[in-house]
């Protein structure tokens, strides 16, 4: 076989086993072909399509970054059990995947990247699209994948394929190490002959590890919780990936401990659960953030504590706060000076902890306090959803209309801009997989490709992409892929003629929305603030790709028409875009969170000077917040 034929057939026989669940690890291959892989991976996929079309499904993509995003979204929906291989040609085809690699690794989600590389033999040096560096002849553009990948190998000789492929599968199915996995394939080696042992092509199972906590440590955790007056859980993506939502629900119902959710942890509890105080941190709710500020014990479960979750280290204000971090990765379990780091699976830990704390419950006064805060926030959300009959409605009103038209198992998809912050606070999640916001890398352009990946993963749910015009313009080409394969999903495109999120942030730091508006250039003033709005017709753009498009005109009936459009889109079997305009200066309710974005220390702009004074006020609440030491032992 050729190296490519052997690799593709090998991937078709890999299976992930997670308890009673057994799934294909690599469910298919995306590929954009060029001279670097058309005779290698391209030929191998063609050959298999003739021999057995079901063995390795092939999918087209329009942008290499897009196919990686789609694979990442699919991986999250399958709780990291399955993903795709993404094959690109040499040079720009390969480097187009770099951003996707960073998204996968930052989010701890598996994806297999197969970038082509220049000739291993170098007989034709320098070849088309080759990066030439006088100081290092061995380096190619694919070396840029090394810091972005959890595993990297380059197959310079055919015999190296076997160890490279097995090493890649090990990391793809390891919940601690997983992320972008890259096998660099020189274009000549892809087509070379290799003797393949039959066992290399046999079915192989990779069991996901679910390690239980170390002996005795759960007793220490239970003791620390029992001594706390105001404990709080911060639930992260690890709860979702370990399928621990039911275990978390059982634990908090037994103990009465409230929960705040990171972006990745949304769905760990349904929005209306009495212990769910909603999102925590910079984009958090008042209920969760007030509980976090007063908590004397934070129990982090499957969270990596990003600056948004920790509100740039202003969220936890109790001087005596301690941290118990339960995480399968020791890197995260030891963060913030954890008093008791528990390196173990979230579900297994929760099951043991529930048993160890049998009979424990937080005080009635504590429950009454956070219950009132939850009710106050829920009322604020209800009020933000009210249709105020504006021609340019607020983003909160649009979210409310989409929410009310969606079904409990539908999946909301987003990644960048102001929408992730508003969705984190406002979206009422009713299913543990119903919220899909890529916020570890917050990658503009992820939304549409990610929405297609969600739709591929589960056709029994509607994938609803909410995206602003800024992110839409970054990457919408994968719409063509969805049309080609008849994939049904819904896009709600909110047009505000600029970058709403950075526009707001620009005002906060005193830069007056400079460079964030889509206007004709004012050459004399060196800005884009004064000109007329650009005549962009994104609805026509989407329709030209073959989508069904529903355009909502800016009238007092905009929200009513949005609700009707959502019903039409959900009833359809085709991909649909709903286009609506909004006012980006109408903001969602404030959740009392903060995000550290430095403001210039000196400026000739009065707005910047004022912003600096406000910034320094917030900085007084910022602290290392290394948790207090271990709980004192009883004599």
Image: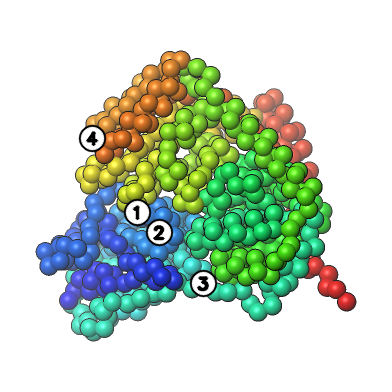
For the residues bearing labels 1 and 2, Cβ distance under 8 angstroms: yes
* Residue 107 as seen in the image, left or right of residue 482: right
Above or below: residue 396 compared with residue 349: above
Any mark on residue 457, and which?
Answer: 1
Q: Position of residue 120 (x, y in %)?
A: 27, 71
Above or below: residue 577 compared with residue 459: above
Label 3 vs 4, first from the N-terminus: 3
* Residue 586 as seen in the image, left or right of residue 391: right
Q: Which residue is mark 3?
A: 210
Label 2 packing within 10 angstroms: few (<14), some (14-19), many (20+): some
- Secondary structure type for disc 1: helix
Please name the residue shown 25% across and 56% down the image: 31
- Secondary structure type for disc 4: loop
**Applied colour scheme:** rainbow
Q: Which residue is mark 2?
A: 78
- Say which quadrant the N terminus sits in: bottom left
- Secondary structure type for disc 2: loop
Please name the residue shown 38% across and 18% down the image: 553
Q: Position of residue 482 (x, y in %)?
A: 27, 44
Label 1 vs 4, first from the N-terminus: 1
- Secondary structure type for disc 3: loop
């Amino acid at each position: 076989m050729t190296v490519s034929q052997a690799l593709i057939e090998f991937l078709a026989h890999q299976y992930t086993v997670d308890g009673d669940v057994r799934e294909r690890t690599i469910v298919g291959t995306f590929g954009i072909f060029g001279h670097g892989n058309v005779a290698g991976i391209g030929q191998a996929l063609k050959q298999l399509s003739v021999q057995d079309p079901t063995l390795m499904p092939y999918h087209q993509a329009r942008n290499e970054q897009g196919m990686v995003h789609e694979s990442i979204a699919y991986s999250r929906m399958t709780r990291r059990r399955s993903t795709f291989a993404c094959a690109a040609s040499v040079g720009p085809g390969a480097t187009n995947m770099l951003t996707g690699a960073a998204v996968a690794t930052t989010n701890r989600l598996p994806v297999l990247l197969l970038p082509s590389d220049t000739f291993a033999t170098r007989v034709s040096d320098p070849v088309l699209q080759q990066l030439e560096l006088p100081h290092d002849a061995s380096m190619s553009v694919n070396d840029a994948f090394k810091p972005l990948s959890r595993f990297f190998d380059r197959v310079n000789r055919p015999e190296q394929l076997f160890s490279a492929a097995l090493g890649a599968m090990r990391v793809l199915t390891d919940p601690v190490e997983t992320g972008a996995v890259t096998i660099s394939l020189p274009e000549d080696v892809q087509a070379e002959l290799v003797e393949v042992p039959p066992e290399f092509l046999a079915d192989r199972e990779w069991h996901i590890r679910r390690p239980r906590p170390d002996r005795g440590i759960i007793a220490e955790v239970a003791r620390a919780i029992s001594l706390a007056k105001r404990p709080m859980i911060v639930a992260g993506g690890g709860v979702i990936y370990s399928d621990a939502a039911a275990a978390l629900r059982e634990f908090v119902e037994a103990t009465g401990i409230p929960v705040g959710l990171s972006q990745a942890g949304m769905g760990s509890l349904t929005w209306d659960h009495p212990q769910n105080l909603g999102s925590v941190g910079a984009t958090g709710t008042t209920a969760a953030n007030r509980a976090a500020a007063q908590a004397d014990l934070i129990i982090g479960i499957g969270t990596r504590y990003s600056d948004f979750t920790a509100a740039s280290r202003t969220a936890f204000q109790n001087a005596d706060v301690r941290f118990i971090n339960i995480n399968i990765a020791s890197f995260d379990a030891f963060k913030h000076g954890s008093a008791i780091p528990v390196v173990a699976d979230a579900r297994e830990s929760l099951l043991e902890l529930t048993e160890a704390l049998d009979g424990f419950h937080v005080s009635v006064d504590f429950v009454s306090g956070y219950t009132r805060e939850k009710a106050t926030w829920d009322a604020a959300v209800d009020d933000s959803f009210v249709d105020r009959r504006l021609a340019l409605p607020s983003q909160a009103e649009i979210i409310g209309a989409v929410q009310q038209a969606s079904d409990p198992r539908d999946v909301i998809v987003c990644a960048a801009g102001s929408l992730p912050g508003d969705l984190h606070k406002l979206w009422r999640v009713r299913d543990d997989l119903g919220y899909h916001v890529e916020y570890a890398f917050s990658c503009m352009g992820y939304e549409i490709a990610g929405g297609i990946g969600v739709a591929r993963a589960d056709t029994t749910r509607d994938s609803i992409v909410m995206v602003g015009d800024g992110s839409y313009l970054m990457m919408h080409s994968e719409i063509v892929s969805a049309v080609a394969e008849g994939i049904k999903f819904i896009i709600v495109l909110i047009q505000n003629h600029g970058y709403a999120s950075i526009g707001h942030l620009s005002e906060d730091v005193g830069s007056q929305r400079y460079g964030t508006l889509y206007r004709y250039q004012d050459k004399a003033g060196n800005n884009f603030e004064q000109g007329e709005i650009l005549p962009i017709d994104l609805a026509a753009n989407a329709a030209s790709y073959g989508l069904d498009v529903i355009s909502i005109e800016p009238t007092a009936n905009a929200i009513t028409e949005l609700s009707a459009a959502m019903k039409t889109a959900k009833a359809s079997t085709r991909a649909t875009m709903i286009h609506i305009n909004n006012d980006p200066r109408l903001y969602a309710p404030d959740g009392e969170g903060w995000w550290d974005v430095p403001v210039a220390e000196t400026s000739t702009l009065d707005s910047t000077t004022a912003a600096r004074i406000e910034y320094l006020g917030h900085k007084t609440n910022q602290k290392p917040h290394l948790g207090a030491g271990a709980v004192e032992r009883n004599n």
